[in-house]
Structures are given as structure tokens and as C-alpha cells.
Amino acid sequence: MAGIKGLTLLQRFNNKYVIAENGCWEWQNALNTGGYGTMSDETGKVVGAHRISYRLFVGEIEDKYLVCHTCDNRKCVSPFHFFKGTYMDNMQDCISKGRRKQRGKNKLGRTKSYSQLTFTHGTQNMYYKQNCRCPDCSDWRIRENKIRMRRYYEAKLK
């Protein structure tokens, strides 16, 4: 099916990358804020260029799966550098390659101390700080926001 300017999706895709020395097909067109290539598909929806590459050269991919990079180059759209995986697979790959800081580590790699927060957040005296970034406070804020939004929409429907 011909798309923009009478070109097929494959023709449009092939005009937007160059092959680097390391074997990556580096995207030369639009990038999203995360540094990944983007392009519109046949329907006009803007999607990741790596997802289009996977679909064109490997096969269809369900929405629940990610197209993960083995080369760790966000601009790469080479189907030879991809594997299909879940969010958990991608995080495990990221951690195993040392690209992601472990939760609870500061910039120097030292473990943050949550001891004062744990004491304050004991089951007897639950007190959550608004600007605290510990896992307990983050979970509490998410729950509170969901409850607040549910009450708001229930009141609006009445």
C-alpha cells in the first residue's frame, strides 16, 4: 500500500537510516525525547522506528511486547540488533549490562539510607512525606491520587 508521496512504508523507512561501522542502522530522521527514532506508519500514527523495522523485517509484534536493543544504541533500527521481550526482560537486560542504577543508590553508587523514613513510616504511626522519594511514599501517593480521582469522577456523575 502506497503511503506518503506514493512510497511504501519500506521505501520510506529505507531512506531514513545509514549503516554505521559497528553494524547499527542509525536513524537519521525524527527522534523522540528519549532519543529513539520515530516515523509514521501506514495509518499516520507516529510510532518507534525500531518497532516499524521489526515489523518490516522480522514480523508482527503485539502491543504488550517491546522491541529491545542488543546493541544499546537508541538510534539503531537494525533488525539484527533486536529481540522481542517484555518490560521485565528489557529491565533485566538493562541491569545486567550495568546501564541502570539499582533502586536506592545515589549518583556515587552508595546505598541511600531509608532508616529515618522507615522509623517514621512504621505500621503504628503511618506518616508519609509529600516530597519523599522512598518506595513506600511513592506507592502511597499513587494510591491517594487514584482514590482522589475516583471520588472526583463519582461526584461528577451524580
Image (cartoon, rainbow, N blue to C red):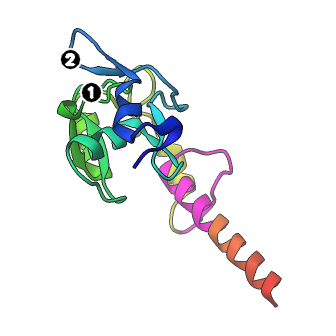
Looking at the image, residue 143 lies above or below residue 97? below
Q: Residues within 10 Å of mark 1 (few under 14, many from 20)?
A: few
Lower position in the chain sequence, tag 2 or tag 1: 2
Q: Residue furthest front?
A: 6
What's under tag 2, amino acid-wise?
Answer: Gly
Distance of label 2 from label 1 (alpha carbons): 22 Å
Q: Tell whether position 125 is magenta.
A: yes
Magenta-drawn segment:
124-144
Q: Are marks 2 and 1 in contact (CB under 8 Å)?
A: no
Residue 104: x, y in percent?
Answer: 41, 38
- Tell me which residue sits at (28%, 43%) in the image: 56
Q: Quadrant of the C terminus?
A: bottom right
Looking at the image, residue 124 lies above or below residue 56? below
Q: Residues within 10 Å of mark 2 (few under 14, many from 20)?
A: few
Looking at the image, residue 137 lies above or below residue 76? below
Q: Is residue 55 visible?
A: yes
Residue 26: x, y in percent?
Answer: 35, 20
- Tell me which residue sits at (28%, 51%) in the image: 88
Residue carrying label 1: 98
Q: Nearer the viewer, residue 122 or 13?
A: 13
Residue 91: x, y in percent?
Answer: 30, 43
What's under tag 1, amino acid-wise?
Answer: Gly
In the image, is 111 to the left or to the right of 158? left
In the image, is 120 to the left or to the right of 97? right
Which structural element holds mark 1?
loop
- Tell me which residue sits at (68%, 51%) in the image: 130
Q: Nearer the viewer, residue 10 or 2?
A: 2
- Tell me which residue sits at (31%, 38%) in the image: 53
